[in-house]
Amino acid sequence: MKWTTTDIPDQSGRTAVVTGANSGLGFETATALAAKGARVVLAVRNLDKGKAAADRITAATPDAHVELQHLDLGSLDDVRAAAAEIKAGHPRIDLLINNAGVMYPPKQTTADGFELQFGTNHLGHFALTGLLLDTLLPVPGSRVVTVSSVGHRIRAAIHFDDLNFDHGYSRVAAYAQSKLANLLFTYELQRRLAAAGQATIAVAAHPGGSNTELGRHLPTVLEVSAMKLFSQSAAMGALPTLRAATDPGVTGGQYYGPDGLGGLRGHPKPVSSSKQSHDPELARRLWQVSEDLTGVSYLD
């Protein structure tokens, strides 16, 4: 049985926060959740693009409940401000979907001086999750879904001695570090939730190879050939996230991805991640470093 959006249960009365919801996977995730009745907060960096996305969603589903929230994951001050605004408007959240990300950019840093991919993909979401968690914990069936990548296996390591790649930048290794961090975070968050007796669960997903704006920093020749050979649509790429977020059979600490060859295309199913991603000592060390760098502590 191939899981599709028709398998998403009714989401009426539920609130979902989706980061990076103005395009690609985030847009498709938000669209599907809104079509099933969820109130969806589009947490986006560019409000003009966010408004256009919201208009597209309501055009497809006229009674959709969508809201815009400015969120720049590359600024911890902005993450704090956005979290405060979200909590003020939504005292209970059912789904936090940590979807936004950057891939393979030239060397850049966030507003706080972190390497852009690690700072945005991991640290921004780590801080946002911690700041919003108390709005999820009391809600039955609440989930934190974080989007990783098959790239978590490619040249992947957590470079504790040089997290910001100040001593030689590799866009591939930096991306891999951030996506490995997404998984280590998910598994450690689940361990801490379970140890605290919380019913909220943490789950991860990856889209396989999806044709989205995320690939805009790929060399043109590589982009064209890779997209033709290995990619699927953003709507298909969003299915693992949607299943992780809504399937009643999902359990904490699972990882969902496409069922096709190499995990690059297909319908969502539970998949495995690297041995390194399941290392609890590595996860605990990363958690402590993330708390220190962001100033956000939770579930100790």
Image (spheres, helix red, strand yellow):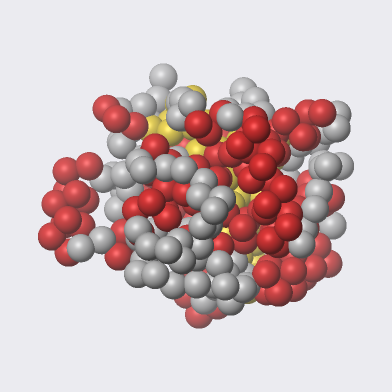
Image location of residue 236, percent across then percent down: 37, 42
Can you say which quadrant of the picture contains the N terminus? top left
Looking at the image, the residue that sits furthest to the bottom is 48
Rendered view: 130 above or below 155: below
Front in this rendered view, residue 195 or 14: 195
Give the side of residue 234 with respect to residue 188, left or right.
left
Is 165 on the left or on the right of 236, as rendered? right
Assign the C terminus to one quadrant of the image: top right
Is residue 203 shown to the viewer in this render? yes
Q: Which of the pair 21/300 is nearer the observer?
A: 300
Is 208 rendered above or below residue 35?
A: above
* Image spot of residue 272 (x, y percent): 46, 25
Question: Which residue: 61% across, 58% down?
Answer: 123
Count of number-bearing discs: 0
Residue 137 x, y percent position in the rendering: 82, 42
At which x and y percent is residue 95? Answer: 68, 46
Q: Residue at x 73, y 54 (%)?
A: 291
**Residue that appears at 67% across and 69% down:** 76
